[in-house]
Image (cartoon, rainbow, N blue to C red):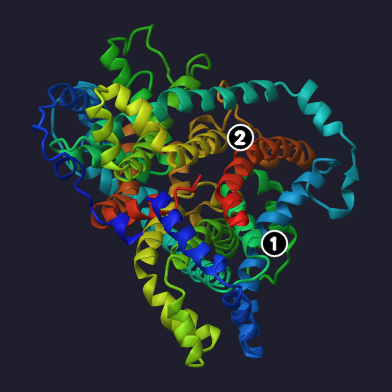
């Protein structure tokens, strides 16, 4: 849906800018002094808020990552070179597990949750009976906060009173698994909980995308004798390219942002280490090692910049040329 | 955009010649998935409806009654939900209004007035929204802590433990997304609308407030619904900025209830269900707006 809106937006934008330059320049010239003041306020306030609360802290994170500080007196900030980075890479045990878990989270969302969402969307797009009801059910978890998802699944996963162990027949026996407590399985349990939410989101976006696919494309493919699978993979899926890009970006960013679930379970320790949780542990825990926390934040920042830059160049690249 | 908001009858209209297929396999698969999807929520609701005495006697996995709302009442009274809900309202309402207002001003400026830095600003706003919040956590926390205000404004002597801190950061974080969506929406409106007003001598503010804003109502409805849910569901910023437990909004407070209701899973389940109710009501009443909002700006990370 957004894709079509972006295209129409782009079309009208290029109409405005691509026309004779008169329109663009003329409009600016016709602005009165008062209009200019109004406009600068309209742009200035949001930009200032954005700079102060988003971009200034981002730059400060980078700065603080090269210092040693306990967060108390501003005068105590001491330069530390790259010590913090050396520390997290060599002497900070949870760092590499966290990197692995973030990667695993991404792989799991990309190979399980996202394809599941796509499958649900394709099935529901077939104009079957009760499609709306199915959609509402699959979409419901998207309405919940990830923190609440963690709590709801905790009730499901508990060792002695959880539903899962009852269903497996292990409840009350020594074989009962503490799904969120056992460090060898809890990351998987948490990813399943995250999938519960992510798949519904992906389904929704693909359903909107599928509605925008030109029906004559499918018709042409079926006249050519393509079966349902061939039609989907060679005709429909490529036509969904703009949605696919959005989904790829969302999947990567969600895996970097995974925080609430693990924080609710055990604050991101004991098998659930994630970069985002480590940042917070260093910030609020005893000791308050701001420099180390910031170095972790910078690692997270630079990893996030990959999908962000990819997405922005896709979205705004064409507009710049137009 | 309006075209996409309409329901397009895909199957029947698109393929008039084809026979209506029966999708038994699909239905079986979807039903199984739907049941699996409902289990976690259903289990919470089921647990919440049973008194702890019943589950102690028969075990959690049993069908013995009685069923009543005692856990809800007890959780509500012991857990302080009334207070937490009110805290959520105090944070969510101003944050959503501010976000939409500021984003619409920004979107108007970048989409309706040609200007050199349009794209640069839009990129900056969109990128800001995609960053993981934890990247900014340390400096924002320290900024709030070292921003001293009189004790009459904040009992901590700085911006920590205040709603203003949470509202400001929530707003800053959400502006980017809303600006992106609204600017696309406004770009799609015909340039003639404001051209005509310009000829009539209408200033920028009148063009914005009296011409463009009313036309954006569908986008505001969708974004407003979405933002209420996003900010109500925000767990992280209150966790970072608010230290005294009685000031937390519900989404963050529920984490503390886990400790408070330790081992009384019936109460915890009731608490979880109570927390879900507002979002569920919004979902049922405003589902179309919510879905439209999400798909309008699928840039949301």
Name the one closer to the observer, A226 or B89. Answer: A226
Question: Which numbered marker is on residue A277?
Answer: 2
Q: Is residue A109 above or below residue A206?
A: above
- Residue B181 makes an appearance in the image: no
Name the one closer to the observer, B115 or B18. Answer: B18
Q: Position of residue B299 (x, y in %)?
A: 49, 48
Neighbor class of circle 2 (other Cα within 10 Å; few <14, some 14-19, many 20+) is many
Q: Which residue is mark 1?
A: A52
Q: Residue furthest bottom?
A: B201
Which of discs 1 and 2 lies nearer the camera? The answer is: 1
Secondary-structure class at tag 2 = helix
Q: Is residue B147 above or below residue A194?
A: below
Question: Which numbered marker is on residue A291?
Answer: none
Real-space CA distance between mark 1 and mark 2, rounded to the nearest whole angstrom: 24 Å
Which chain is disc 1 placed on? A
Secondary-structure class at tag 1 = helix
Q: Position of residue A251 (x, y in %)?
A: 49, 35
- Residue A33 makes an appearance in the image: yes
Name the one closer to the observer, A81 or A280. Answer: A81
Is A237 left or right of B259, judged from the image as shown?
left
Q: Position of residue A122 (x, y in %)?
A: 29, 32
């Amino acid at each position: 849906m957004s894709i079509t809106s972006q295209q129409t937006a782009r079309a009208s934008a290029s109409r405005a800018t691509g026309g004779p330059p008169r329109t663009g320049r003329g409009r600016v010239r016709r602005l009165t002094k008062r209009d200019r003041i109004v406009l600068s306020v309209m742009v200035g306030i949001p930009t200032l808020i954005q700079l102060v609360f988003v971009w200034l802290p981002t730059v400060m994170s980078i700065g603080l990552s090269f210092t040693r500080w306990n967060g108390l007196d501003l005068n105590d900030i001491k330069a530390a070179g790259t010590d913090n980075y050396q520390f997290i890479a060599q002497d900070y045990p949870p760092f590499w597990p966290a990197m692995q878990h973030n990667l695993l989270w991404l792989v799991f969302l990309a190979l399980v949750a996202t394809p599941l969402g796509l499958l649900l969307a394709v099935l529901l797009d077939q104009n079957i009976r009760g499609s709306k009801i199915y959609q509402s059910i699959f979409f419901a978890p998207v309405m919940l906060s990830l923190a609440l998802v963690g709590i709801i699944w905790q009730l499901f996963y508990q060792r002695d009173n959880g539903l899962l162990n009852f269903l497996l027949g292990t409840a009350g026996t020594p074989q009962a698994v503490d799904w969120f407590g056992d460090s060898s399985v809890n990351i998987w349990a948490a990813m399943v909980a995250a999938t519960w939410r992510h798949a519904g989101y992906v389904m929704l976006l693909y359903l909107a995308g599928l509605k925008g696919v030109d029906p004559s494309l499918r018709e042409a493919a079926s006249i050519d004798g393509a079966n349902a699978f061939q039609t989907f993979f060679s005709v429909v899926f490529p036509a969904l390219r703009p949605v696919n890009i959005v989904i790829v970006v969302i999947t990567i960013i969600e895996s970097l942002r995974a925080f609430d679930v693990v924080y609710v379970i055990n604050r991101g320790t004991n098998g659930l280490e994630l970069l985002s949780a480590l940042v917070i542990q260093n910030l609020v825990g005893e000791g308050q090692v701001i420099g180390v926390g910031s170095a972790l934040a910078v690692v997270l920042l630079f990893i996030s910049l990959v999908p962000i830059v990819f997405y922005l160049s896709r979205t705004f690249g064409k507009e710049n040329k137009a | 955009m309006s075209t996409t908001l309409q329901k397009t009858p895909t199957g029947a209209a698109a393929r008039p010649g084809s026979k209506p297929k029966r999708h038994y396999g699909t239905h079986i698969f979807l039903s199984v998935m739907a049941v699996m999807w409902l289990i976690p929520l259903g289990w919470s609701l089921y647990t919440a409806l049973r008194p702890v005495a019943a589950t102690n006697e028969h075990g959690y996995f049993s069908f013995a009654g009685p069923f009543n709302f005692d856990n809800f009442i007890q959780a509500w009274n012991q857990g302080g939900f009334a207070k937490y809900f009110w805290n959520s309202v105090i944070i969510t309402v101003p944050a959503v209004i501010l976000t939409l207002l500021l984003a619409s001003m920004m979107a108007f400026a970048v989409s309706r007035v040609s200007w050199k830095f349009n794209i640069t600003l839009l990129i900056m706003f969109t990128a800001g929204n995609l960053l993981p919040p934890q990247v900014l956590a340390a400096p924002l926390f320290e900024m709030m802590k070292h921003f001293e205000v009189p004790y009459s404004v904040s009992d901590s002597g700085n911006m920590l433990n205040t709603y203003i801190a949470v509202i400001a950061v929530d707003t800053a974080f959400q502006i980017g997304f809303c600006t992106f969506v609204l600017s696309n929406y406004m770009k799609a409106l015909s340039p003639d609308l404001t051209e005509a007003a310009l000829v009539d001598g209408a200033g920028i503010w009148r063009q914005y407030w009296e011409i463009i804003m009313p036309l954006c109502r569908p986008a505001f409805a969708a974004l407003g619904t979405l933002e209420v849910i996003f900010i109500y569901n925000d767990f992280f910023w209150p966790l970072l900025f608010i230290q005294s437990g009685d000031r937390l909004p519900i989404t963050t407070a529920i984490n503390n209830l886990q400790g408070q209701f330790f081992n009384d899973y019936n109460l915890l389940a009731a608490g979880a269900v109570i927390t879900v109710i507002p979002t569920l009501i919004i979902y049922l009443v405003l589902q179309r707006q919510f879905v439209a909002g999400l798909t309008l700006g699928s840039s949301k990370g």
